[in-house]
Image: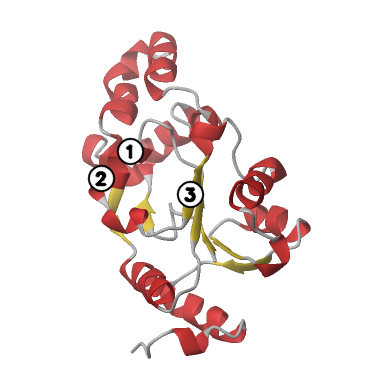
Amino acid sequence: MVFDVGGVLLDWNPRHLYRKLIADEAQMEWFLEEVCSPAWHAPHDRGVSTAVSCAELASRYPEYSELIWAWSRRSEEMIRGVVTGTVEVLRELKEAGLPCYALTNMEAETYPLRLRRFPFLRWFDGTVVSGREGIAKPDPAIFTRLLDRFGLMAETMLMIDDTEENLYAASKLGMQTAQFRSSRELLTQLESAGLGQSLAPHK
């Protein structure tokens, strides 16, 4: 089993922070699309320091300097909490003796904070963090790195991720995949994959 972290096990979304800082929803969406945009954020998952990129961006948009710096200084407020049902599934799979790994797009500097904050991140048999590797999903190289580092075979792995392009990359390497939408749907997918006997009944 290979789990993504953000969007599957942790409820990560920059909006959890920026709704506190920008009262108008439309203005907040504009800011996250045009200033602290997905394209601007993507290099963080490949190891670029958020402090460095926030300094550069704030110099370009001085009128938004405080909001830009919040991305680096208040990053943990982007996590509303755990996706409870999925963490429970992970716990049951571990208790059943199934090896579980994490493959996450995450900044190198924020991973240690979350490792301390969320003990379940220490349950994995191995973890690959994109910010530490300098490559990020959906680059096939990061999936290969997971397999090589822990001596795994793609054909025996099930990748759980909330992003379709990440799952496509995993499937091209021979992994089975399950797109995460909810913990209830994940249970159904795991049962279809023959893992139902490993899980306790869920209401």
The total of numbered circles placed on residues is 3
**Residue at 31% in and 17% down:** 65
Disc ID at residue 185 = none
Of residues 175 and 146, the one nearer the viewer is 146
Q: Residue 192, position in %: x, y?
A: 60, 85
Q: Nearer the viewer, residue 19 or 141?
A: 141
Q: Nearer the viewer, residue 141 or 69?
A: 141
- In the picture, the disc for residue 116 is 2
Q: Are marks 3 and 2 in contact (CB under 8 Å)?
A: no
Q: Which residue is mark 3?
A: 127
Whether pointer 1 and pointer 2 mark residues with C-beta atoms closer than 8 Å, the reply is yes
Task: Give the Cα separation between the discs numbered 3 and 2.
Answer: 15 Å
Q: At label 1, which amino acid type do we have?
A: Pro
Placement of 112 over or under 8, stated as above or below? above
Q: Which picture quadrant has residue 56? A: top left
Say left or right for 10 vs 182: left
* Depicted 88 relative to depicted 68: above or below: below
Residue at 35% x, 35% y is: 110
Q: Position of residue 196 (x, y in %)?
A: 51, 87
Q: Which quarter of the image is occupied by the C terminus? A: bottom left
**Amino acid at the residue labelled 3:** Thr
Query: Going 34% across and 54% down the picture, which residue do you hit?
Result: 122
Q: What's the residue type where badge 2 is placed? A: Arg
Question: Would residue 126 appear left or right of 192 to someone viewing this image?
Answer: left
